């Protein structure tokens, strides 16, 4: 069974992931459909105004530009309908993802090896989906939950993270492998992931 501490850590991850998906869902609005549509070109809403005299070439192509803008306006209802349908299906997919992530809060699969890295591998944030700052903030919360306030304050995680970032830990933590040919392949570990591994080795198992 998942312990009380593990459950608390998982709930923080669920909150972060759900908040991100809710932000994506809110962005799928009809207002944004209009803002991101070709109507921007028609009304030049994203271009600075200029009082400079138009060149001869600009005057020559002006009729073609006007025709193009008229075509955009005429076709906009179809564009809006297609975009609205895509938003509808994306919202449906996001709702399903949110429900699936929220169910993580009820998982019963306990971590066999009670280490920080093992817990992170099972329930932590994905490698490339979130920024290092976001993952570092979650790591701080987890350590305080798992090991207590005193241990959290004694670690000085911000300084540890800065140190690992500035001393080229990415290169030092790279793992080397060969796949049947002479060219080496490197898997680069980000500083925050290196920090998780370091802490997992140095801290005792949590209860």
Image (tube, helix red, strand yellow):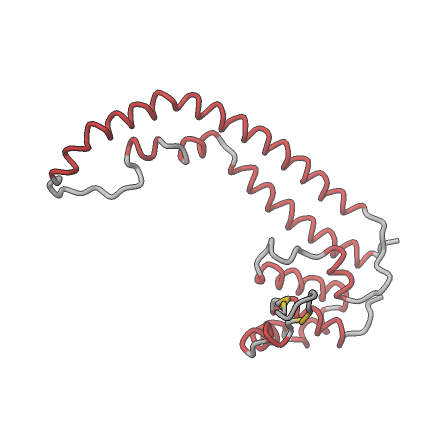
User: Residue at coordinates 85% horizontally, 52% vertically from top-left?
Assistant: 109
Using the image, determine if residue 93 lies above or below residue 180: above
Residue 48 occupies quadrant: top left
Looking at the image, which is closer to me, 147 or 24?
Answer: 24
Looking at the image, which is closer to me, 154 or 61?
Answer: 61
User: Residue at coordinates 58% horizontally, 77% vertically from top-left?
Assistant: 163
Q: Residue 79: give x, y in percent of width and height.
A: 44, 25
User: Residue at coordinates 26% horizontally, 25% vertically from top-left?
Assistant: 67
Using the image, determine if residue 135 lies above or below residue 164: above
Query: Residue pushed farthest right?
Result: 1
Q: Residue 56: give x, y in percent of width and height.
A: 11, 38
Q: Residue 10: give x, y in percent of width and height.
A: 74, 53
Q: Which of the image's four quarters has the C terminus?
A: bottom right
Q: Residue 130: give x, y in percent of width and height.
A: 59, 55
Count of number-bearing discs = 0
**Relative horizontal placement of residue 71, taking residue 177 as reference (left or right):** left
**Relative horizontal placement of residue 184, taking residue 123 as reference (left or right):** left
Query: Residue pushed farthest front?
Result: 181
Using the image, determine if residue 26 lies above or below residue 166: above
């Amino acid at each position: 069974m998942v312990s009380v501490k593990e459950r608390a850590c998982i709930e923080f991850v669920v909150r972060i992931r759900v908040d991100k998906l809710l932000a994506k869902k809110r962005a799928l609005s009809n207002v944004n459909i209009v803002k991101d549509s070709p109507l921007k070109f028609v009304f030049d809403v994203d271009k600075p105004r200029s009082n400079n005299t138009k060149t001869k070439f600009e005057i020559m192509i002006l009729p073609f530009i006007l025709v193009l803008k008229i075509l955009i306006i005429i076709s906009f209802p179809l564009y809006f309908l297609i975009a609205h349908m895509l938003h509808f299906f994306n919202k449906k997919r996001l709702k399903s993802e949110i429900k699936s992530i929220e169910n993580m809060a009820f998982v019963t699969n306990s971590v066999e090896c009670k280490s920080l890295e093992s817990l992170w591998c099972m329930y932590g944030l994905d490698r490339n989906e979130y920024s290092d700052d976001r993952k570092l903030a979650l790591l701080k919360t987890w350590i305080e939950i798992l090991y207590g306030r005193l241990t959290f304050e004694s670690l000085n995680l911000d300084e540890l993270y800065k140190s690992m970032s500035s001393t080229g830990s990415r290169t030092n933590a790279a793992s080397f492998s060969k796949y049947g040919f002479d060219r080496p392949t490197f898997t680069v570990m980000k500083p925050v992931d290196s920090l998780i591994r370091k802490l997992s080795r140095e801290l005792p198992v949590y209860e």
